[in-house]
Image (spheres, rainbow, N blue to C red):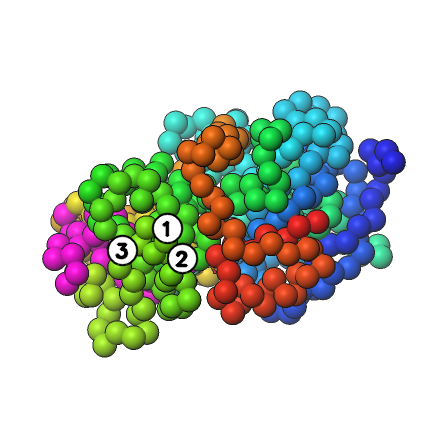
Amino acid sequence: MDTAGKTITCRAAIAWKEKSPLKIEEVQVEPPKSGEVRIKMASTGICGTDDHVLKGDLSMKYPLIPGHEGAGIVESVGDGVCSVKPGDKVLTLIVPQCGECDACLHCLGNFCDKQDILPCSGVMMDGTSRFSYRGQTVYHSFRTSTFTEYTVVPEVAVVKIDDAAPLDKVCLISCGVPTGYGAAVNSAKVTPGSTCVVFGLGGVGSAIVMGCKASGASRIIGVDINEQKFPRARALGVTDCINPTKLQKPVQEVVMEMTGVGANFAFEAIGKIETMLAAWNSCNSSYGVCLIVGVAPVNTQLCLQAVSIVSGKTLKGVCLGDYKTKDCIPQLVTDYLQNKINIDPLVTHQLPFNELHKAMKLYHKGKTIRCVLLF
Ligand code: COD
Ligand code: ZN
């Protein structure tokens, strides 16, 4: 049936308010307007950022459809769309690339002006939503909203990928893989023989570990309060595991003792102030580089000892691995298809969309690295 130009009724997960369980409902998805793309979703990962949304750590408009780590097939396109066409396999982009703003035009920038994360407006670029439930507006999250059978995104927030890509897995390359692997390989440019410490061994932290290992790090220290994460982390390349809740002293002191001089690279992939400070204080005071990957709750402050920076260490934030997303993400998919990176160990669970509640339970129990929902 040709659905182009028509409103589609389909299943979607709605968060009616913050801190309340998701409900699968029948929603209406309007056709894409000019410069927009409607996608039939094939898969979506459950990322820590989605959990931040559901917990109310980010400022959002409710009711909303969460999700951003998505893979699917273009169903129809609005006027003027030329980079994708119906039938193309695509990934959604939480950080878009408009190609026109200051960040896109600068050789080092990637945090495009058209992003809708900080802050999240909940609407498309024309100020309206494409989702409704019985006539009531339902908001977008990050202009991606992937926990739905159909979604609408701006053209700048979608990219065509290789036709051979397995859609049940490559959704991870929409967020977790570039965010983690890219932070190590592209942003930090981890050096061979270096010592790295990774705070948080979830999907993103595990991808960081993969990037550190691929870059030739000789020691990778993994820190997590959930010891269930340790065996898989070791399989990916972590050499030493630390559970901070079992320590009598701050984790940074243990890292200092283990390394003698502090880590060359520290990554924070949790999104908490205390672990950001621990990552900073785990770095070598002269040449250490601390990368903040996690987003802390809005309106919180990160306070450093002012003298701790003058000795030469670097503090850097990084989003989506500093990649210009439309330019770089398809290449990561091709790299996966050519066995240059292996994302398979990150996909620990795959469940049908209607088992969303089971998937969320597994995530909250800390059982998953990445659980992929299949439509
Ligand atoms: N100390 C040590 N480990 C901890 C602590 C703590 N205090 N608290 C939680 N953890 C561990 C958990 O046990 C878990 O293993 C891990 O931290 C977090 O993993 P996940 O699987 O819940 O989350 P991820 O890996 O999917 O996402 C982590 C992010 C930091 C990316 C995410 O939470 C976030 O802040 N995202 C926004 C940043 C960003 O760039 N986003 C881009 C698109 S997502
Ligand atoms: Zn994400």
Query: How far apart are the alpha carbons under marks 2 and 1?
Result: 6 Å
Disc 1 residue type (three-letter)? Leu
Q: Which mark is residue 61?
A: none
Query: How far apart are the alpha carbons under marks 2 and 3?
Result: 11 Å
The residue pinned by badge 1 equals: 236
SS label for mark 1: helix
The residue pinned by badge 3 equals: 239
Question: Residue 163 occupies which quadrant of the picture?
Answer: top right
| Extent of the magenta region | 257-286
Give the residue at x 29% y 75%: 246
Q: Which residue occupies the extreme right position in the image?
A: 1
Q: Nearer the viewer, residue 4 or 334?
A: 334
Q: Nearer the viewer, residue 187 or 240?
A: 240
SS label for mark 2: helix
Q: Which mark is residue 232?
A: 2
Rendering coords of residue 185 (x, y %): 34, 38
Give the residue at x 22% y 46%: 218
Crowding near pointer 2: few (<14 within 10 Å), some, many (20+)?
some
Rendering coords of residue 312 (x, y %): 16, 46
Is disc 2 in contact with disc 1, using a CB cutoff of under 8 Å?
Answer: yes
Give the residue at x 73% y 54%: 12
Disc 3 residue type (three-letter)? Thr
Rendering coords of residue 250 (x, y %): 24, 70
Rendering coords of residue 147 (x, y %): 66, 52
Crowding near pointer 1: few (<14 within 10 Å), some, many (20+)?
many
Disc 2 residue type (three-letter)? Arg
Crowding near pointer 3: few (<14 within 10 Å), some, many (20+)?
some
